[in-house]
Amino acid sequence: MIYTCTLNPSIDYIVQVSDFMYGELNRGERTDYYPGGKGINVSRVLKRLEIDNTALGFLGDFTGDFIKSFLLKEKIRTDFIEVNGTTRINVKLKSNQETEINGAGPNISDKDLQQLFDQIRQLQPNDILVVAGSIPASVPNDFYVKIAEICTENKVKMIADTSSQALKELLGTKLFLVKPNQHELGELFDVRIDSIENAVYYGKQLQQQGAENVIVSMGGDGAVYISDNNCFIAKAPKGKVINTVGAGDSMVAGFLTAYNKGLEQDDIFRYAVATGSATAFQADLCEKKNVETLLQLVELKKAEF
Ligand SMILES: Nc1ncnc2c1ncn2[C@@H]1O[C@H](COP(=O)(O)OP(=O)(O)O)[C@@H](O)[C@H]1O
Ligand SMILES: O=P(O)(O)OC[C@H]1O[C@](O)(COP(=O)(O)O)[C@@H](O)[C@@H]1O
């Protein structure tokens, strides 16, 4: 079984304003509300790709209720822990540029954290757990490391898609997959990743630090995949970009879907890239048919290692 865990879910409030003017009254031309947070996006895309999964994490108040009922409508199994505060609303402003404001999120108590540990201790060998997104300020930065220890003990495969200090803490931890984007990887090693060569070099460092599979995503430029002694480089398909929020999460869901089907490494990566791009070309997250259309448009090559 696949589980996702989102410590800090959100409602993603997407507002389109042509020619946004700072300090003026701007009127939204189109507004959309989606459940967000990286693990929740992974769960939603997995479901669309016909992979059963359960979404875990913390939700609170009316924003939490919105997310729960949205996921229920999409027939996604959930087992969220109810917290006292209000689940955050993240603002995604689409104008000439994309601007994002991600909220801080509610306080999570020690009791809530213990409850989550208890849930994770119930997972079975060969289950997969995707921990994704930021760690709320009230939760220690090494929280994912503690989860990883439980996963290792119970032979659960752990995937991490996070950034900043939470990602730094995970260096040296055994992970099944880690998927930083180029900026997150650059921040991790205090460098600027502006070429495929750089992405391969630092991706390999991550592999040496304990990750079995590493994908470095590079937005419209595609991605790099490192596993065993193999390295693949993919160019993303070209298309009309509508909303890139959740593209990285979709990539993780695409990877898992293809891995679950037992595909070869190159085809797993092709599927992951197609899924990320399929989401970038939709207002909401992608559907299976969007992914299948893009599969043959992903240009992939094997690189010398
Ligand atoms: N502008 C784009 N055009 C085509 N594909 C895209 C675009 N932006 C993202 N993608 C696809 O989604 C994947 C993940 O995007 P990226 O922005 O790197 O991740 P994140 O959302 O984690 O920052 C990319 O590797 C690519 O396949
Ligand atoms: O937990 P964080 O780092 O604040 O990120 C949360 C945001 O990331 C998202 O999950 C999107 O992630 P990606 O664009 O990286 O795939 C949004 O749904 C959410 O608003």
Image (cartoon, rainbow, N blue to C red):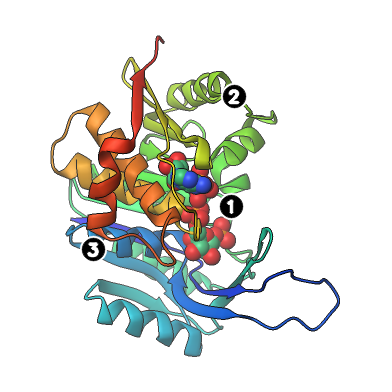
Q: Amino acid at mark 1?
A: Asn
Q: Is residue 215 left or right of residue 135?
A: left
**Which residue is the site of mark 3?**
47
Say which mark, if any, is on residue 18.
Answer: none
The residue lying toward the viewer, choosing from 213 and 90, is 90
Q: Label 3's element?
A: helix
Give the residue displayed 44% in from the left and 42% down from the top: 238
Say which mark, if any, is on residue 195.
Answer: 2
User: Percent position (x, y) of residue 53?
Assistant: 22, 62
Q: Earlier in the sequence, mark 3 or mark 2?
A: 3
Give the residue displayed 55% in from the left and 79% down from the top: 30
Q: Is residue 43 left or right of residue 163?
A: left
User: Percent position (x, y) of residue 58?
Assistant: 44, 73
Q: CA distance from mark 1 to mark 3?
A: 30 Å
Instruction: Indicate yes or no: mark 3 CB to ligand 2 under 8 Å.
Output: no
Q: Amino acid at mark 2?
A: Ser
**Which residue is the site of mark 1?**
141
Q: Residue furthest left?
A: 262
Q: Nearer the viewer, mark 1 or mark 3?
A: 3
Q: Nearer the viewer, mark 3 or mark 2?
A: 2
User: Percent position (x, y) of residue 20?
Assistant: 74, 70
Disc 3 packing (10 Å; few <14; some 14–19; many ≥20):
many
Q: Label 2's element?
A: loop
User: Percent position (x, y) of residue 184?
Assistant: 59, 41
Q: Nearer the viewer, mark 1 or mark 2?
A: 2
Quarter of the figure that contains the N terminus: bottom left
Q: Label 1's element?
A: loop
In this orientation, does residue 135 appear?
no
Give the residue displayed 54% in from the left and 72% down from the top: 108
Q: Amino acid at mark 3?
A: Lys
Q: Earlier in the sequence, mark 1 or mark 3?
A: 3
Disc 2 packing (10 Å; few <14; some 14–19; many ≥20):
few
